[in-house]
Image (tube, helix red, strand yellow):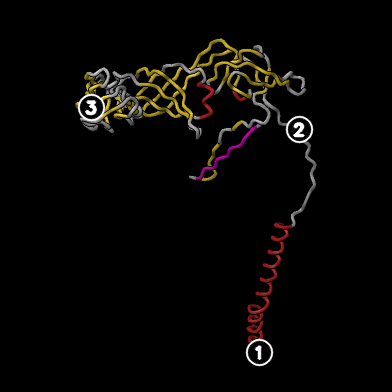
Amino acid sequence: MRQSGAFGKAAVIVWRRWILPILLVLVLGASAAALVKIAFFPDRTEASVSPEAGVTDPVIAVERGSVVNALSLSGNVARDEEYSVRGEINGTVTAVHIGEGAAVAAGQVLFTVKQDDPRKDIDILAPEAGEVTDLALVKGQVTSVGSEIYTLTPARYHLLATVEPVQLYRLVNAPAEASVTITGGPAPFTCTGVRVQVTAEGTASVRCAIPADQVVFAGLPATLDLALGQVDDALVIPVTAVTGGAGTGKVWVDAGDGAEPEERAVTLGVNDGTVVEVVEGLAEGDSIRQFVPGFIAPVEEVCYEVSPGVEQCESGTSW
């Protein structure tokens, strides 16, 4: 009986130390081999896919509508630039009536000069209100025609608004007046002398003069609103359908028979950045491609929740 019990214990020890570990290694090895097979050597089934639908260019009809070309620009109030004033007489300064940095009114006496020929005293007056700096005359000094005698910073202001270069064509034939709204300031008012400025570096801006009766301060933020044109009951198409946008352009007319679209020249009118008036080249009801060849139309971003508190967004483009 003792021998039988010893034999049983020995068998248990052999099972635990040798046979069970070997079985576990074999099972784990087989599982690993199966995973490798699935990951790197999947069963391949050749499938023949035949497209059932193709990408087509959307076609729209030419319709009638209204176009309002209004442009709103952000800018700031700024003081007009200083300029040098030159002498207009030959003579000797007998009196200086102002000091450096003085604020003067239009017509105020600045200097008195004794003219040489004919000999007489002449008062030099301020041409407009502003601040006088860089005084170049003192009592007893000789002055001559053309010499710089002082610098005047006028008490005039203007509005300077930045504009994207792509919008410059919309400003062709812009009106001479615009509406100005100053943040936290008076009621909207009209500024005059609207003009477009483009620097050598390509920076574009719109400038207009602020009326003298408006109380403003340099640096104030403001909005410049320009009414550039309006048409009603006109033939209109989206700007995505035409190359060009200022005066002339080209569209692609679709005959509806599957043939290649016809490239056609058109004359354009008022453009609001989204739709443009067609003055000549199309008729109401004509079918045209909504996008010019090669144009990529953006698709709105679509977001959805993939797990609690986690959102995924997808976007793309359509041709």
> At 67% from the left edge and 23% from the top edge, which residue is drawn?
289
Q: How many marks?
A: 3
- At label 1, counting other C-alpha atoms closer than 10 Å, the crowd grade (few under 14, some 14-19, many 20 or more) is few
Q: Give the amino acid type for the residue marked by disc 2 in the picture.
A: Glu
Regarding mark 3 in the picture, which secondary structure is present there? strand
The residue shown at (33%, 19%) is 211
**Pointer 1 residue:** 3
Pointer 2 or 1: first along the chain: 1
User: Residue 69: in sight, yes or no?
Assistant: yes
Picture coordinates of residue 184, whole percent (x, y): 31, 26
Q: Amino acid at mark 3?
A: Val
Element assignment for label 1? helix
Q: Which part of the image, by quadrant, shows the N terminus? A: bottom right
Q: Is residue 30 above or below residue 192?
A: below
- Tell me which segment is drawn in magenta: 310-318
Residue type of the residue flagged with mark 1: Gln
Question: Foreground mark, 2 or 1?
Answer: 2
Residue drawn at the location 61% of the way across and 37% of the way down: 316
**Helix or strand or loop: what does disc 2 sit on?**
loop
Q: Earlier in the sequence, mark 3 or mark 2?
A: 2
Instruction: Name the spot of residue 239 as percent of width and height, x first.
Output: 59, 23
Task: Name the quadrant containing residue 60.
Answer: top right
Residue marked by disc 2: 52
Are there few (<14), some (14-19), or many (20+) residues within 10 Å of tag 3? many
Q: Nearer the viewer, mark 3 or mark 2?
A: 3
**Quick one: 302 or 299, which is closer to the camera?**
299
Q: Is residue 78 visible?
A: no
Q: Residue 176, percent across and down? A: 43, 16
Residue picked out by circle 3: 93
Report the side of 241 relative to 125 (left or right): right
